[in-house]
Image: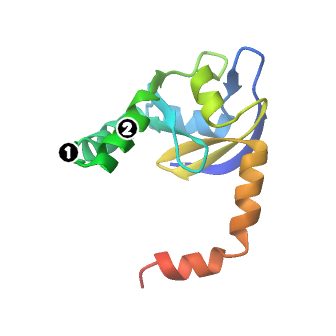
Amino acid sequence: MFYGEYAHTMDRKGRLIVPSKLRQAFKQHDIKTLFLTRGLDVCLFLFPESQWRTDESRFKQLSFTKAEGRKFNRLLFSGASEVTVDRLGRLLIPKHLKDFAEIKQDVMIIGVSTRIEIWAKEKWQAFYESSRQSFEEIAERVMLE
């Protein structure tokens, strides 16, 4: 559903223009409400509401009696914000999430199938450079025959 890599700049008010290809996917799949939260690897995760609800039900099944389950759910859900794209195609990123992802102004918006990731540009470049050389090795380990 969401694919591609897009370089964008955040405005002074913390708004980010969502790339037109992704906005088209929102329209095509009738996505109006999104959930933005802390992601992994120092990025933000942006989920359509339907995917958020599916993942939320899985995460709620983590045992609250286990420290790791409590910690994960606290960090994921406490950072979550329900967001919408305004009529100009902008998305407001709350300050606590910008701080978490170390976003200053330049960002990379990455389509990752069922979610969108928002990265500080320099964090994405570092991740990409450190990971691209091992892409084939990673594929061999994670892909099933």
Q: Residues within 10 Å of mark 1 (few under 14, many from 20)?
A: few
Q: Is residue 80 left or right of residue 136?
A: left
Q: Which mark is residue 74?
A: none
The quarter of the picture where residue 138 lies is bottom right
Measure how far apart labels 1 and 2 are at the Cα level.
23 Å
Q: Residue, x 59% and y 16% (percent of image)?
A: 86
Q: Which residue is mark 2?
A: 52
Is any part of residue 100 visible from this angle? yes
If the image is split into quadrants, where does the C terminus sit?
bottom left
> Foreground residue, 99 or 133?
99
Q: Residues within 10 Å of mark 2 (few under 14, many from 20)?
A: some
In the rendered view, tell whether residue 121 sits above or below residue 104.
below
In the rendered view, tell whether residue 4 sits above or below residue 13.
below
Q: Secondary structure at mark 1?
A: loop
Q: Residue, x 49% and y 34% (percent of image)?
A: 37
Q: How is the image coloured?
A: rainbow
Q: Secondary structure at mark 2?
A: helix
Q: Amino acid at mark 2?
A: Trp
Give x and y (percent) for residue 33. Answer: 44, 25
Give x and y (percent) for residue 57. Answer: 25, 41
> Foreground residue, 57 or 34?
57
In the rendered view, tell whether residue 10 sits above or below residue 53.
above
Q: Which residue is mark 1?
A: 65
Q: Is residue 133 left or right of residue 113?
A: right
Give x and y (percent) for residue 88. Answer: 67, 17
Q: Residue, x 56% and y 43% (percent of image)?
A: 116
